[in-house]
Image (spheres, rainbow, N blue to C red):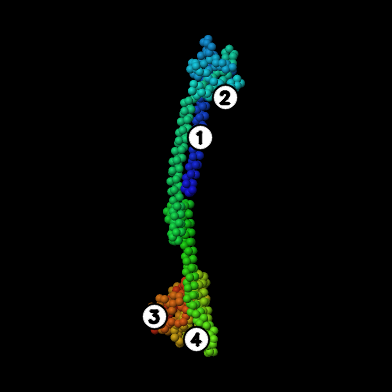
Amino acid sequence: MSIRLRLTLLYSVILAITLIAFGTILYATQRRATFESIKSDLVRQAGFIVGAGQPRPVPPDGLQLPAPPASGELSDQGSTVRTLPGRWTQTISLDGAVTGQSPDLSSTTLPLSQEGMAAVQDGKGWFETAQVDEEPLLIYSLRYKTAAGALEIVQVAFPIAQPLQSLSTLRLILVVGIGVVCLAAFAIGWVLAGTALRPIERIRRTAQEIGDEHSFKRRVEHSGPADEVGQLAITFNQMLAELESAYRQLESALRSQRRFVADASHELRTPLTTLRGNMELLGLDPGPDPAERAEILTDSIDEVERMIRLVSQLLTLARADAGQALGREPLTLAPLLEDVCRQAKLITTRSQIQCEPPPDGATVIGDKDALKQVLLILIDNAHVHTPPGTAIGLSVTVAGPSASVSVRDNGPGIAADVLPHIFERFYRGDGERSGTGAGLGLAIARELVERQDGTISVQSEAGQGTVFSVTLPRVAG
């Protein structure tokens, strides 16, 4: 059962119960008022029949008898049954014999039940209903004393067919009216519930479409007030934004994982193949001569060292792809460049390192170890991809809110068609700068620089040398 139907039914049931209770109270109040009025008239009529000066019994239900008239005796025309004034009036003895009647009761006798007779004989007034000549009557019976001192019972009646018909009509009107109002309320409640729940239905459809399309870019459109439904739409959109971010991170992580596996399998295949071939050669019978064996071992060691460097580089890239946070702190470039130059001179025996002192107070925001690794990669790249004897220069330029560290060589340069690809993973351009590396160094350098909110760029022309520049935010001073 839908929420819309449940809300409509609940609203309709509450309204129906309220209307039924109201109708019941209204009908009961009207019925009581109608019969209380009739009873008052009957008590008043009985008071006119009772003789003056006679004891006045107390009528039932607290009704008060009016004062009797001055001449209260019943007229006696000498007949067995006296003729009484008024309508629907009768007197009987205590044993039930009729002693007087009004003219309209000439052929009819008003009944009195045994329970009523006992109550009247005790001096109490008694009301009861009876069907007389197919006419429903409300009969009031009361004991009184005649002028001669005898005890009799006076009965007065009132036809209640019309009041009962009026009450029946009122009951029918209430039943039909309550039914019509409940049906109309159900229809109106159904429409109102649909209008109120339409934004929720829109949210449901959007959620279903997102699930079917796997697209977290969709958002719920809500132009209504910021009520509960509006807050639900806002919360749902916030949840979608978080899911979109998480989904993108997951996709990025999966891409990084696939790329890492592809990179590792691609680059490790060659040294592993070489090692396998060397081991097969060593396993031949007869085996290679001592000189060839030494050459095979040297080649195997070189391939193992190459794999170690490659695995280290791949792990560095994997940590960068995983979003590993880098430190962000002020770095004074002078001591950092001195340390880089000192280490570079140990690993670049074929090239001359020229380190220019940076401007006084040149300080950038970054990670010391990451920036040092980037500069060593650039220096090693210049050393590996240029002929022996090439001079490699290291300098700092300060411009506005940033500072740039440049690594310059005087080698053969890089062709224009190669420049757009040199920061791609495992890319090795053809030409004189091509070396034996895996093509990961510059890719690692770019990843580390960008993680420090910096940029890395290259300027080169064939035969004119190459300049790599690392630009980082500068500490104002």
Mark closest to the chain's N terminus, 3 or 2 = 2
Label 4–label 1 contact, CB within 8 A: no
Name the residue that disc number 4 marks.
349
How far is mark 4 from mark 1, CA to CA?
109 Å
Distance in Å between CA atoms under marks 4 and 2: 131 Å
* 10 Å crowding of disc 3: few (<14), some (14-19), many (20+): some
Q: Is residue 405 visible?
A: no
Task: Say which element carries label 1.
Answer: helix
Front in this rendered view, residue 444 or 343:
444
Q: Mark 1 to mark 2: distance in Å? A: 26 Å
The nearer-to-camera label among 4 and 1 is: 1
- Say which residue label 1 marks: 24
Relative to 440, say whether 224 is above or below.
above
Q: Which one is earlier in the sequence, the residue at label 3 or at label 4? A: 4
Q: Amino acid at mark 4?
A: Thr
Q: CA distance from mark 3 to mark 1?
A: 100 Å
- Residue at the (59%, 13%) spot, across then down: 149
Q: Residue at x 49, y 40 (%)?
A: 16
